[in-house]
Image (spheres, rainbow, N blue to C red):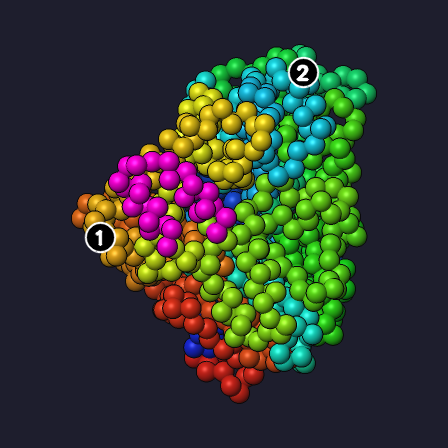
Amino acid sequence: MQRVIKGVDAGFELSWDNLGVAHVWAQTVADAYRGMGYAAGYERLWQIHLSCAYANGQAAALLGERFVAQDAMQRAFNVHGGLTSRPVSPGDWVASAYLDGLNAYVSALDEVPPEFVHAGAEPRLFSLDDIAARYRFTSWFQHKSWTEKLLLGRLMATHGVDYFRDHVLHLSSQDSAQIQLLKEPLQRIDPKMIELAYPEVRVPDFSGSNNWAVTAERSQSGYPMLATDPHQPHTIPNTFFYVHLHAGDWDAFGAAFPGVPYFMMGFTNQLAWGLTTGFIDCYDLFVEQVERAQYRSADGWRPIEKRTESIEVKGGQRRQIEIQSTQHGVLLEPLMQELGLASTVPEDFQTSLYWSLRDVPTSAGALALLPTANSAQEFGDLMFENDVCPLVNNIICVDKASNLQRYIATTTPVRCGVTGSVPLAGWQREHDFELSTAEQLTVERNPADGTSLTANNDTMGEAGDFYIHNFPAHSARADRIRELLGEKSKFSVADFCQMQLDLTDLRARQMVPELLRVLGSSDEPDVQLAMEVLGSWDLRATADSAAACLYYPFLDRFWPRKFMHAALQDDLIKLLPAAAPGLNRFDIASFMQPGSPWAPHAELLNQTICAEMAGVVMRVKQSLGDDPQRWRWGDLHQVAFAHRLQEHPAWAAMTVGPDEIGGSATTLGMAMHMGKGPGDAANGSGEIACRVYHGPAYRLVVDLGDTSRARFVIAGGNGGRAGSPLATNHYPIWLTGEYFTLQLQRDEIDEIETWTFTD
């Protein structure tokens, strides 16, 4: 089949293999990217259209009134980049070639795709501005650390710093001084502003991945290896689009967000790279002293800046939203009033939110040249443009010459004295921070042990000139990678595949002994049964595990919230799990530190834990019966996902599961679940007690000694068109922990369709 893309250099072919992977066979790199854009449009046009609407603050125009607040918030902070001129980039030619292909597909449509018909929308052409906005949106939404700062600031101001000191990763004496200085306004700060970040959270009156690499010396093949498995919500279509580009002697395979030409994770003939969400703190929350239409700065009083954003609403009237800002960022209380979340605005102190990219221009060509690098050093040089990178990620890159580097790919404040964990006084000059540089964010160069790893953890500790991760995920997965890498001197591809599936839970290894000590204080029969089951656990979250049926539902009940609320009688505590997920350092031992103000509540702690465990045992019995020998984690913990439009005929077949699955949020074989839990689901409704909704979007292991034999599998599949069997064809292999061999040699690929492109 022959197709046309204007501006093609030499003509190329696009083929699809039996795994659903797109392969572009071109003579020039630009043509390869044209094919990538066309293929992405063919499979994922609605996904691209919707993502651009989110990034540009136009979701309400596409989806209706409920997205007005989201659009207003993002436009207020220039997430779309329209308030700063888009700079020219050396990678613009790649982005433009990609758009040639994507827009050629849109222009050639002879009928409106069914997703657009369902939404009452029309396909449109895309621009460099769309690509730049998509990158900025990635930085904006991945880690909303400012809600942690808000809750922590108010709780510390109300109850004292010492109550929460042991539950924060980083807290300095200067942070404590800020709490004391701002005590009164922090006690009055309106927690309803959290709804600006998490619209689904309703505030009462009063929101991961694994990645590691080794150098040649640690590999059985004598060449470097990399393993990566990015964690995303399980969806159909998959979060990423997977494509292989070939031009001359250049090959690149990777995973990209549909609609952008940036391979987030992948490999070429010369190097391999992987990525995890960095839990990088790119936000600061400021308490601003205001008076009439002015705010106090280090240089005296300044006028509050005002502008109006116009929000188009599908089926409704366009909304005019006034935005008020200081030098740090947008004032949140006036914005809440504009959106109907508050009836009044404080006249003495207000809260401004700083985001590191608000006033920083970013390009469309950023990141596009990464697959053209020939070394880890060159890869790092291409990641930043004038010290700016529009991401919030940890990236590991290793090249064929065994150079291994890790970068914190972001643009973030260089804080001094304060850590960034709590709100700051806006009128103090020392809080006007500089932005980071590429040199500061290249954090590992050829580590002595020949390994580098990240897993959404604090990767820096006390190293570096400033704190980067303030509210990271638990370190259990990272610790397990480090433990496994220490068990052998050399590794194979099979070893890395097995590591990705590992179900040993190091958080449980730490917590279960503490838990058993507390449970031992109770004579209640169900608590004693829990002690027996947990005491014999091998700490592996297998589908056959009985102990997992108790341990993980017990964590789901978030006993720390109940304990802290009972001790402090503060309803704000109830918001912690949903509104401040980064405040997660609440293990039993953290409450019982010597001298902690929680210590006098030790008996309440024990009672709370025992009562919660007794409740869990009762609920598991309701679901699985009274005999713990018959309890299986897989009978509660199951994975199922589907296309959002599965209720309509065109997408009815695009669904998988439910199927039992092991794992947890803190095992390398990661499986995060939600649901009503055991007991509530035992009502004949077919409801999954603990439904797995988040985990590896795909798994990749590559040995640079033979990149034509990488191991690879997608959670669902690479397809996205209505009714496509390629949207779910990987699922059975992914579920059982198996892998496909990713063939890149054309004579070895099982091609199911091929198209030819000319000018």
Kind of residue sitting beneath label 1: Asp
| Residue at 62% across, 74% down | 490
Give how far across and how far down residue 360 sits, in percent: 72, 42
Q: Tell whether position 529 is magenta.
A: yes
| Residue at 65% across, 23% down | 179
Check disc 2 and report its element: helix, strand or loop.
strand
Kind of residue sitting beneath label 2: Val
For the view shown, which residue lies furthest in the right direction? 299
Tell me the crowding category of disc 1: few under 14, some 14 to 19, or many 20 or more residues within 10 angstroms, Cα based.
Answer: few
Mark 2 / mark 1, whichever is N-terminal: 2
Quadrant (top left/top right/bottom left/bottom right) for the C terminus:
bottom right
| Residue at 73% across, 62% down | 447
Give how far across and how far down residue 163 sits, in percent: 56, 26
Give how far across and how far down residue 531 sits, in percent: 35, 46
Q: Is residue 616 left or right of residue 35?
A: left
Tell me the crowding category of disc 2: few under 14, some 14 to 19, or many 20 or more residues within 10 angstroms, Cα based.
Answer: many
| Residue at 38% across, 68% down | 736
Which stretch did the figure color magenta? 509-536
Q: Main SS of the magenta segment? A: helix
Q: Is label 2 in contact with label 1 (beta carbons under 8 Å)? A: no
Residue position marked by numbered label 2 in the rendering: 290
Q: Tell whether position 502 is magenta.
A: no
Which residue occupies the foreground of this view, 736 or 611?
611
For the view shown, which residue lies furthest in the left direction? 684
One can see residue 496 in this view: yes
Check disc 1 and report its element: helix, strand or loop.
loop
One can see residue 8 in this view: no
In front: label 2 or label 1: 1
Residue position marked by numbered label 1 in the rendering: 627
